[in-house]
Image (tube, rainbow, N blue to C red):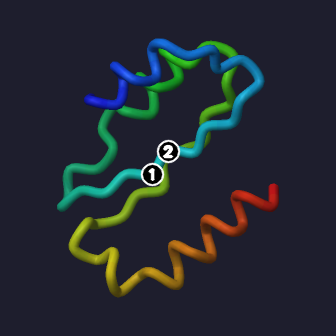
Amino acid sequence: MPVLGFIEHYEWSGKHIIPVNTSEGSGAGKSVARIREVCNGAVVDEAYELKGSDVDERIAEIESWAKGKVQQ
């Protein structure tokens, strides 16, 4: 997972991580579990998953989801 190289070098205690995953059917796999392992002390939500080819037609849904997360 390319993102691990980035996240391994930061302090995550007290942070809230909201994974977003796009794929064409493979899903998030073990990505969320791996993020939880690396980001000690962070609260890590389940991934918001959607098919990459559906993104354009689901923009309103994605925006609504994101706004709800920011307001929490």
Look at label 2 and name its amino acid.
Pro
The residue shown at (37%, 51%) is: 21
- Gap in angstroms between the C-alphas marked 1 and 2: 4 Å
Q: Quadrant of the C terminus?
A: bottom right
> Badge 2 is on which residue?
19
Picture layout, residue 11 above or below residue 1: above
Q: Which residue is mark 1?
A: 20
Seen in the picture, residue 39 relative to 17 is either above or below; the reply is: above
Contact flag, marks 1 and 2 (Cβ < 8 Å)? yes
What amino acid is labelled 1 in the image?
Val
Disc 2 on helix, strand or loop?
A: loop
- In the image, is 21 to the left or to the right of 72? left
Residue 68 x, y percent position in the rendering? 72, 66
Residue 14: image quadrant is top right
Please indicate whether residue 23 sits to the left or right of residue 69 in the image. left
Crowd tier of the residue under label 1, counting other residues whose Cα lies within 10 Å: few below 14, some 14–19, many 20 or above: few
In this image, 51 relative to 49: left or right? Answer: left
Task: Residue at 56% x, 19% y: name it.
Answer: 39
* Screen quadrant of the N terminus: top left
Dot 2: few (<14), some (14–19), or many (≥20) neighbours within 10 Å?
Answer: some
How far from the left and from the top, in percent, is residue 16? 69, 36
Identify which residue is drawn at 55% across, 16% down.
10
The answer to whether residue 59 is above or below residue 52 is below
Say which residue appears at 30% left-offset and 38% top-offset.
29
Tag 1's secondary structure?
strand
